[in-house]
Image: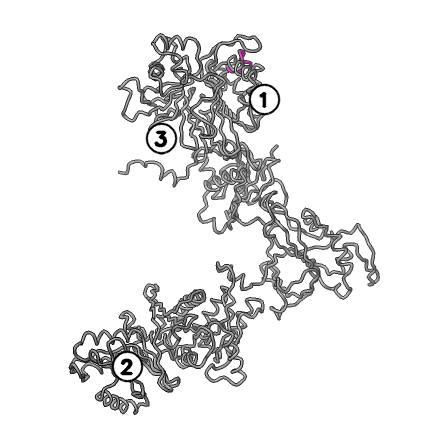
């Protein structure tokens, strides 16, 4: 049985994939919880550590950073063992066997990068130059320039680079019951329809799980806007890879922002563009689950996501498929959200019930108050 | 899309059911975030919670249950009944483990298989809610019914039984006679009329019907009339109405006052693709007689009391009410064996002597496990004081124990002859009894002496010939110890030899010192003939259980067995002792037979060795059986302290001998005694008696003759013994 866990972190992402064979993948890291006792967001490092301890591990097989915004990287510098500098090592820091980043993470020279994002960038650059423990997605010319400026031959690092439209070589259906198909970032190009496709930095992928003969697809959309989604749909169709658009589980893009559906928010419901609608309505499967890694859906209009209009549309999509739209900060309820665990087995995917506590089991699983 | 929940809305304050209140409290405390309570309702006698229940239902379920289902959980206000869970979704699927309700919708989930009385004392509201989620999740995956769990019945529960003996049942039409017994609690049992002589009886014609397999899981309503039944059977490929028209049309008029019983083998399978497993067997009895049934099926019409054949296809049995019965087969030995966890019954022919306290209980235990075809010999009548420890009951007082036990056991197997009684004294049978006994001895493979009588034991040992393996099972006088002596099939040791070695064991094994010590008469009195004997029934029952088990084990083993089970009354624990006896040497001296234990031979050779170069000697321990002219030598007493030992002679002293033999007599209840003398010869002399030895033998002969016993002298040589009984040559 495989497991996907979406952590409740507000408008931020961390998803863990636990494979039946014991391998673990962490997608993004956002330790958003403040010290506030009333903060309902997950205590991410504690949850991750206890899971690793139970599995007797101190590493992830893969840690992927879909892009390096704050809501996908915050706290990573305190949690991970980074090879590029001794001060980020030891003290129970968690190791990464293979770090996944998009090419943008290597070449970007933004000044506004936050500390954690900078550290991930430094680590990725260090590993790429060293030539191990890294996979970079897409290879625009600038990546080649970047390498050669540092005296590293592009040809010598080619095996560490995977293009959109390819499978990530770290996993296989036979060995792991998982293959990961890369949708984005993709190279700027003219598509078959003659449209110029803009390069985008975020890592979007389809994780295909296989248990027995049962296939379950999870589409992880990171933070991409509707036009990128349109490009993904179009390119994938052009390459006759439509089954790579299939999804049983979707990590909704950008915390249920309307901008991932259309340029227009709409009054009460966002109307998606045709290609976005195609992805959501045509390629979604029966009983599919849409996961919005976000704050609770507001009842009034808001500037920041999640947008109630987008949520209204996603709910429609869930109804079409006889599925569910689940907001991480609302699961199972707003007062006491819990990590969302979906397991995958020969019956497809199953949303696990949040633990129901009986008084006696609660008593044996928690530390009681001090007795006087 | 949702059905209405029962009752009308109410407030929590109106709830009375402990389970309902606990459930509400649990949900409010956030104890089960997967369940939302939408509404609280009340109906007569019920508190109802309308819930949205989130369950771990997969995306590709076996049964189309949804991840969130709306359920009305109906609690009995007094918590006297199982909570009912009604699925309110209109198209909730028909899945296994639904309760049979008066209407199909809403579907009622069968949450627990065990009776509510077994649950109510520990069940909490939180557990009911959790079970609800589990039920939905497992049902959706088709895993609620485990692969190793028996199939679900196809029809609902009925409290009524009919007891049938399948072996007396022939295919096609049968006429049977039944007695009906009603228990006053609304249940009735139909019994073969032979077993209940006092009840009113009626006759039926029965027909067996076997359907094609139907997938199990969905329990159907009991049919109310023949029309209902025909509808039910049609899914199994049976055209009941036309079959009945054909069958009954040919039934002679003298059967028209019978009632009709349809015995239906409703075949079932686990899934659409699997093979048929054992059927759900039900019997359906018509209320009216065949005459009326025929009319209701349009086979004939009765006009002015005259039956006229017609065919009225519009009459399809709607007026013929039927009662559903659970047919139960009578118990067979194989069935009994299976109920005891054995594969098959064992028909081993056993001749048991003695149907007393121990015997009756051992035989009953074994028969109940399907073990043995028994012939029981006993000459006693069952008397009131026997009931304190006998398997039989008050109804048998004054009757033969053997006959009554046979009847009692055979009645369990609907008259099958599992026990045959011989009401006779095994020692003094009449000439007819003698021939019956002779036949039983010949046919038995095991002769089991449970008579608690030495004379019977010796009779069986010496007078009963044939190939049967012999065994004895008895209690010691206090009832604490059970002893089993058993020959092996090759009879390397005979039952009488085993008895003697068992006595010797009591001398050798210090822990058994109190086994029979102090008993005035070994084993006598244990047959319950003595009204004054004290023996606890719980001890007898325990030992009868061990005894039956030991006999069953023995039948499968080829070993000689001498075992003793000792009960520690304070803690009621049992300890087992075993003796592993070696074969005895047998010598014949005219009419006398001498049995020499391997133990005494080894002992004598050793004693000689130790005394060399001097001679040594002592006395012998053993037993006589005057009737069979047998002498058993089981051990030797070493040279007394005041003996004189020389290289070529030996004079036995007598110091301590009297005390030792008194002890031997006490420890064995007089069964072992002084039986003769032994002495050793030095190297190279052999075991032939010297002139001194001849004088000694004369002295012995003189001494023993007064008691009518044969003199016994053993001379111990380097490797062998010279054994002289009665005469020196």
Q: In the image, which is nearer the foreground, mark 3 or mark 2?
A: 2
**Image height of B671 relative to A191, above or below:** below
Could you say which is closer to the camera, residue A76 or residue A18?
A: A18
User: What residue lies at 33% left-to-right and 28% top-to-bottom?
Assistant: A58
Dot 1 falls on a residue whose secondary structure is helix
Query: The disc numbered 2 marks a residue on which chain?
Result: B
How far is mark 3 from mark 2, CA to CA?
Answer: 85 Å
In the picture of the structure, the residue carrying the numbered disc 1 is A282
The magenta segment is A260-267
Q: Is residue B285 left or right of residue B608?
A: right
In the picture of the structure, the residue carrying the numbered disc 2 is B722
How far is mark 1 from mark 3, CA to CA?
Answer: 38 Å
Q: Position of residue B198 (x, y in %)?
A: 62, 70
Is A72 contained in the magenta span? no
Could you say which is closer to the camera, residue B208 or residue B660?
A: B660
Q: Are the numbered discs 1 and 3 placed on the same chain, yes or no?
A: yes
How far is mark 2 from mark 1, CA to CA?
Answer: 108 Å
In the picture of the structure, the residue carrying the numbered disc 3 is A52
Say which quadrant the C terminus of chain B sits in: bottom left
Q: Position of residue B702 (x, y in %)?
A: 27, 92
Q: Residues within 10 Å of mark 3 (few under 14, many from 20)?
A: some
Could you say which is closer to the camera, residue B240 or residue B552?
A: B552
User: What residue lies at 49% left-to-right and 60% top-to-bottom?
Assistant: B342
Q: Residues within 10 Å of mark 2 (few under 14, many from 20)?
A: some
**Could you say which disc has been placed on residue A365 in the image?**
none
């Amino acid at each position: 049985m495989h497991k996907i866990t979406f952590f409740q972190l507000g408008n931020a992402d961390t998803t863990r994939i636990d494979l039946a064979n014991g391998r673990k993948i962490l997608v993004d890291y956002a330790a958003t919880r403040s010290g506030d006792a009333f903060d309902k967001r997950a205590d991410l490092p504690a949850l991750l550590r206890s899971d690793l301890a139970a599995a007797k591990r101190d590493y992830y097989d893969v840690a992927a950073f879909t892009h390096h915004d704050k809501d996908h990287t915050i706290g990573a510098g305190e949690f991970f063992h980074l090879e590029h500098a001794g001060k980020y090592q030891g003290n129970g820091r968690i190791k990464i066997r293979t770090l996944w980043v998009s090419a943008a993470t290597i070449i970007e020279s933004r000044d506004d990068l936050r500390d954690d994002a900078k550290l991930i960038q430094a680590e990725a650059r260090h590993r790429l130059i060293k030539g191990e423990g890294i996979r970079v997605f897409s290879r625009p010319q600038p990546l080649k320039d970047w390498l050669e400026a540092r005296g590293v031959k592009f040809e010598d690092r080619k095996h560490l680079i995977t293009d959109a439209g390819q499978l990530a070589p770290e996993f296989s259906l036979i060995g792991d019951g998982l293959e990961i198909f890369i949708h984005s970032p993709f190279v700027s190009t003219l598509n078959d329809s003659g449209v110029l496709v803009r390069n985008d930095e975020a890592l979007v992928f389809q994780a295909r799980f296989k248990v027995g003969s049962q296939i379950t697809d999870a589409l992880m959309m990171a933070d991409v806007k509707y036009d990128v989604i349109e490009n993904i749909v179009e390119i994938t169709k052009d390459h006759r890879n439509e089954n790579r658009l299939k999804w049983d589980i979707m990590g909704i893009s950008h915390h249920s922002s309307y901008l991932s559906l259309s340029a227009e928010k709409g009054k009460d419901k966002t109307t998606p563009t045709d290609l976005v609608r195609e992805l959501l309505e045509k390629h979604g499967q029966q009983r599919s689950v849409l996961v919005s890694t976000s704050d609770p859906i507001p009842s009034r209009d808001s500037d920041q996501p999640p947008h109630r209009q987008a949520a209204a549309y996603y709910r429609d999509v869930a109804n079409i498929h006889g599925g569910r739209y689940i907001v991480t900060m609302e699961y199972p309820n707003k007062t006491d959200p819990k990590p969302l665990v979906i397991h995958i087995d020969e019956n497809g995917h199953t949303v696990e019930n949040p633990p129901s506590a009986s008084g006696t089991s609660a008593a044996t699983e928690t530390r009681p108050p001090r007795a006087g | 899309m949702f059905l209405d929940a029962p009752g009308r809305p109410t407030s929590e304050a109106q709830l009375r059911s402990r389970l309902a209140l606990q459930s509400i409290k649990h949900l409010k405390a956030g104890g089960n975030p997967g369940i939302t309570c939408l509404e609280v309702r009340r109906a007569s006698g019920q508190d109802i919670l309308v819930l949205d229940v989130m369950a771990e239902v997969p995306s590709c379920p076996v049964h189309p249950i949804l991840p969130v289902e709306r359920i009305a959980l109906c609690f009995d206000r007094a918590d006297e009944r199982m909570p009912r869970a009604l699925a309110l979704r209109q198209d909730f699927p028909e899945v296994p483990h639904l309760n049979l309700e008066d209407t199909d919708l809403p579907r009622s989930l069968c949450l627990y298989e065990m009776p509510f009385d077994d649950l109510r004392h520990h069940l909490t509201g939180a557990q009911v809610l959790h079970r609800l989620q589990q039920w939905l999740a497992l049902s959706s995956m088709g895993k609620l019914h485990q692969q190793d769990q028996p199939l679900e019945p196809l029809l609902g529960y009925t409290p009524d039984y009919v007891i049938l003996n399948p072996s007396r049942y022939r295919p096609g039409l049968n006429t049977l006679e039944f007695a009906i017994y009603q228990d006053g609690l609304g249940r009735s049992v139909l019994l073969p009329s032979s077993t209940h002589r006092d009840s009113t009886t009626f006759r039926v014609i029965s027909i067996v019907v076997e359907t094609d397999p139907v997938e199990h899981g969905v329990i159907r309503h009991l049919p109310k009339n023949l029309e209902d039944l025909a509808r039910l059977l049609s899914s199994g490929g049976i055209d009941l109405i036309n079959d009945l028209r054909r069958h009954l049309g040919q039934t002679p008029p003298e059967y028209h006052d019978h009632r009709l019983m349809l015995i239906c083998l409703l075949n079932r399978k686990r899934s659409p693709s699997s093979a048929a497993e054992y059927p759900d067997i039900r019997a359906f009895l018509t209320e009216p007689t065949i005459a009326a049934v025929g009319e209701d099926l349009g086979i004939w019409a009765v006009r002015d009391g005259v039956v006229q054949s017609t065919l009225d296809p519009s009459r399809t049995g709607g007026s013929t009410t039927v009662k559903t019965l659970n047919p139960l087969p009578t118990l067979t030995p194989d069935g009994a064996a299976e109920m005891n966890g054995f594969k098959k019954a064992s028909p081993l022919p056993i001749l048991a002597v003695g149907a007393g306290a121990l015997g009756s209980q051992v035989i009953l235990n074994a028969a109940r496990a399907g073990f043995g075809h028994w012939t029981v010999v006993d000459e006693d009548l069952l008397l009131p004081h026997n009931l304190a420890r006998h398997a039989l009951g008050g109804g048998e007082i004054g009757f033969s124990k053997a006959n009554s036990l046979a009847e009692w056991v055979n009645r369990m197997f609907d008259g099958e002859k599992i026990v045959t009684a011989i009401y006779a004294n095994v020692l003094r049978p009449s000439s007819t009894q003698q021939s019956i006994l002779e036949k039983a001895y010949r046919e038995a493979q095991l002769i089991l002496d449970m008579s608690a009588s030495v004379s019977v034991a010796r009779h069986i040992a010496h007078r009963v010939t044939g190939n049967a393996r012999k065994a004895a099972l008895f209690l010691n006088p206090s009832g604490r110890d059970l002893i089993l002596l058993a020959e092996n099939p090759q009879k390397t040791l005979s039952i009488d030899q085993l008895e003697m070695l068992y006595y010797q064991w009591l001398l050798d094994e210090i822990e058994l010192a109190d086994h029979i010590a102090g008993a005035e008469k070994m084993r006598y009195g244990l047959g319950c003939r003595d009204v004054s004997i004290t023996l606890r029934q719980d001890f007898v029952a325990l030992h009868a259980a061990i005894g039956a088990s030991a006999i069953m084990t023995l039948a499968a083993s080829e070993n000689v067995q001498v075992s003793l089970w000792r009960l520690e009354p304070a803690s009621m624990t049992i300890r087992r002792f075993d003796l592993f006896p070696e074969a005895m040497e047998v010598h014949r001296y005219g009419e006398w037979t001498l049995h020499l234990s391997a133990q005494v031979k080894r002992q004598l050779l050793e004693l000689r060795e130790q005394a060399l170069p001097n001679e040594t000697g002592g006395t012998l321990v053993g037993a006589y059986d005057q009737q069979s002219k047998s002498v058993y030598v089981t051990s030797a007493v070493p040279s007394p302290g005041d003996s004189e030992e020389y290289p070529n002679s030996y004079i036995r002293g007598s110091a301590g001998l009297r005390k030792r033999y008194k002890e031997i007599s006490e420890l064995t209840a007089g069964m072992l005694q002084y039986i003769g003398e032994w002495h050793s010869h030095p190297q190279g002399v052999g075991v032939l008696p010297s002139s001194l030895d001849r004088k000694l033998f004369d002295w012995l002969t003189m001494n023993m003759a007064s008691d009518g016993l044969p003199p016994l002298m053993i001379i111990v040589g380097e490797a062998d013994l010279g054994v002289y009984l009665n005469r020196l040559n």
